[in-house]
Amino acid sequence: MKALILAAGEGTRLRPLTLGRPKPMVPVGGRPILEHLVGLLRKHCITQIAINLHYKPEQIIRHFGDGSRFGVRIEYSWEPQLLGTAGAAKQLAWYFDEPFVVLYGDVLTNVDLGHLARQHAAHAAVASLLLYEPDDQTRCGMAEVTPAGRVVAFVEKPAQAMPGRLANSGVCMFEPLVLTFVRRGQVADFGNDVIPALVARGLPVYGELGRGYILDIGSPERYADAQADFASGRFISPLDGSDLLTRKAC
């Protein structure tokens, strides 16, 4: 299995922390958010990773290189102009020839990706979303889910709260088929464009409650929450305080 980490955004809501670095390079517990995400993938033996780049890309490339220091192989995808979350994946359609995981680079998490993969396969889904209960629905993509877990409606950042619905965590799994819904070079978003289109076509999209810690670091206040959660042990990094190279080979 392969993965895409979305790391191209400018992080305007997190300024001034992002004036001199990409948002995924903001540190939590002394390590960039992006390093925690690479560690999460490596922990689940997902070692082929693509990262899209736009804002201050040299910092990410300098830190991670080809990924070998972290026990993974990294493919970089440069976007002169931002393509959106789905547009970024479409640019890498040649790379994603099998089911792939997408992690939003501003989401700090240690969720169980193995559980997501098993459920994705069991449902024969074209898309699977890890969901959570947000404190502000108007900042999230909100899913209406049946008791069996099928997503029957999806609205990105609704104007008002939608009782009973759950939010997309920014951790998703897709079949390559979903990229046929995006034109190459087109600006497109999974939440605004692709997921609603899949649901409207009646294709199997499923949602699972995330098992673990999930925090969208989209503001200085949420960044402070992340730092406090790391210090208190509420967030346990997939890195677990150790060098990835000491982990057993996948």
Image (spheres, helix red, strand yellow):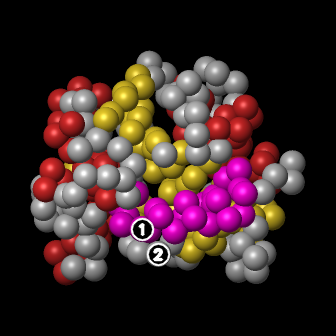
Would you say residue 123 is visible in this rendering? Answer: yes
Residue, x 33% and y 33% (percent of image)?
Answer: 74
Label 1 Cα crowd, 10 Å radius (few <14 / some 14-19 / many 20+) = some
Name the residue beneath numbered marker 2: 211
Left or right: residue 89 versus residue 230 is right
Q: Is residue 248 part of the magenta span, yes or no?
A: no
- Label 1 vs 2, first from the N-terminus: 1
Query: Bounds of the magenta span?
Result: 107-130
Left or right: residue 229 versus residue 7 is left
Give 123 or 240, whichever is nearer the viewer.
Answer: 123
Residue, x 62% and y 66% (percent of image)?
Answer: 119
| Residue 111: mark | 1
Q: Is residue 127 part of the magenta span, yes or no?
A: yes
Distance between the alpha carbons at the discs numbered 1 and 2: 5 Å
Left or right: residue 223 versus residue 211 is left
Percent of width and height locating residue 64: 21, 36
Q: Amino acid at mark 2?
A: Arg
Q: Amino acid at mark 1?
A: Val
Tag count in the figure?
2
Outermost residue, front direction?
Answer: 249
User: Marks 1 and 2: CB-CB under 8 Å?
Assistant: yes
